Image (cartoon, rainbow, N blue to C red):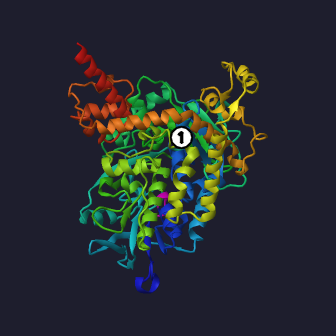
Amino acid sequence: MLGNSLTGFNNIDTIVVGGGHAGVEAALAAARTGCKVLLITMNKQTIGRMSCNPSIGGLAKGQMVREIDALGGAMGKAADITGTQFKLLNKSKGRAVWSPRAQVDKREYEKHIHKTVTSHNNITVVEGEVVSPIIKKGRAAGVTMSNQDKIISKSVVLTNGTFLNGLIHIGDKKIPAGRMGEVRSEGITESLSSLGFKHGRLKTGTPPRLNRETINWSILDIITGDEKPAPFSHFHSLFNPPNTPSHSVNTNERVHNIIWENINRSPMYSGEILGVGPRYCPSIEDKINRFKERNAHRLICEPEWKNSDQIYLNGFSTSLPEKIQLEALQKIKGFESVSLIKPGYAIEYDYFFPNQLKTTLETKTYKNLYLAGQINGTSGYEEAAIQGLIAGANAGLFCLGLGPITLSRSDAYGGVLIDDLITKSTPEPYRMFTSRAENRLILRFTNANKRLSLKAFSSMLINKKQHNTMQEQTKEVMALIKYCDKTITTTQANPILKKINEKEITQKTKLKELIKRPSVSLEMFVSMKTKKLKVRQPYVDEVVLEADTEIKYSGYIRRINKQTKKILNNEALLLNSEIKYDNISGLSKEAQEKLNKSKPENMGQAMKISGVTISDAAVLSVYISKKQRVSRET
């Protein structure tokens, strides 16, 4: 139990409530600014716990982890140290959407994060339950504990995750909890509501954990990582992680029939859960219901730690009764004798509408009070972490009397996330996707150092050595691009072009012009023998890739910037209420659904709808322009 604040915790600058991914990055960011931080968690042992999937990164999420690292955060380095398999996703598509992902050892990740937090000289960790922030003269001045002790501070960051009145559902069983086996937090929702904050109810879910020994692995398909893996962190001297395989398997019609026959026993369909679930991470019940035409869904078996007896079944999130889960799973080939270590479950929890926040993640109503993570309606480790970092950094900078750090939509995926939250709010768990970023052509995982290192250094989130390391990487990219201004002769170029069936040149040509061809790459002409790079070995290939991409994308980037400017200038463009948005090719499925439902009167209203991106607005703008032109011509 906590002692009296006057004797136990003096001179605290920032209090961070919660030890999940948002709380960890918030505490560390505030501490890096030089502030004294008190991290209050209900259980010290669960700091940094990966409560759901054993992975970091993924589509758009990998870019955010790179951004977190460039801002001095812990997630990327922790994933690199504890990763068991690394893979670059989306490589069949344009480079702007290539996204790094790593499977990690959940136990080792948690240990690493725990040590990073508890060993920091500016952070004190205590166990306890916060029930409300203390507000004095319109400012946060500390927190009140469940035993009524009060702890005074200059700023407060709330990162309560799914613990706010959390309720777990497994069939008709209801368990008050923040995570399976952990007590929920009570009091914060009520206290913030009494202060005038509006809140809602969301839900998320997790799949069952399977017993490794009961799976017939010989039937399953093996999935391995990349032979030359890309790290998340910018600061390694060496990077040579393991490549532990995962396995895939498919559901079938027998599985679907069992789920369909029992779907009303799922709390989401029986009306027991009122909270809205994540659109793009649906439960297996949702998949069966929404995609009736599909007779199979892919599942991934991921080990949760090294030599784990517990297998995470990615793709089978569910809240069906445990008996039904097992019955359905045993109809999958290779799972005939499978047993569960833990059943899947849904968890329902409170969140606060994020349009009540500023760009700094400080509340609009009360100064020095910040909210970050799932309390703001987001879903995912990475989304929580980037919010925590920005909120914690600003809480710390405020205590020092310094200006805040903010991310714009053109700076980072984190800027897109925060801007979407505070301007559009969110009626469902918000998950980051590349399609949400109109500037995704420049928000690549390979240039987070260029985009954010100076901002991080100016806000004291990284030191001079880290800043210099990232600057060196960026300078090497620029040097390679400049090198490509040289001309290349037919004798030098044509043997290479002929080898890849490319049209040969007839006169001296700038190397840069050749590289703009889709099938030609910089590394074909610039080997490490001819151009010695100064960057550390783990980043040599990345520097070459980034220079190549900068050259290839230069024209596209100019075009998208011009298009974005045009869209923003066309907010008054009228939209006919009779438009059938689901007939407009190029619009995302989410945009079609929400535009059909909202029937906005003009482009400005359309762009304010949660889920409608700048890319969707571009498609819509072109569609309207064509319609108007046809109308004039006829």
| Overall secondary structure of the magenta section | loop
- Quadrant in the rendering for residue 398: bottom left
Q: Mark 1 belongs to which amino acid?
A: Asn
The percent position of residue 341, horizontal first and vertical second, equals 56, 48
- Tell whether 226 sits left or right of 21: right
Residue drawn at (23%, 17%), measured in percent from left and top?
A: 631
In the image, residue 61 above or below residue 392: above
* Quadrant position of residue 479: top right
In the rendered image, which residue does mark 1 sit on? 314
Identify the residue at the far top of this view.
Answer: 634
Helix, strand or loop at mark 1: strand
Relative image position of residue 320 (x, y in whole percent): 42, 41
**Does 153 sit above or below residue 359?**
below
From the top left corner, tell me how far across and down residue 252 is, in percent: 51, 26
Q: Quadrant of the N terminus?
A: bottom left
Q: Looking at the image, which residue is at 49% across and 26% down?
A: 254
The residue range painted magenta reads 18-22
Density class for disc 1 (Cα within 10 Å; few <14, some 14-19, many ≥20) is: some
Q: Inspect the magenta stretch and tell me whether residue 320 lies in it.
A: no
Q: Position of residue 97 (x, y in %)?
A: 52, 37
Q: Residue furthest right?
A: 529
Q: Would residue 501 appear left or right of 368 to someone viewing this image?
A: right
Most foreground residue, 611 or 211: 611
At x 37%, y 77%, the residue is 147
Image quadrant for the C terminus?
top left
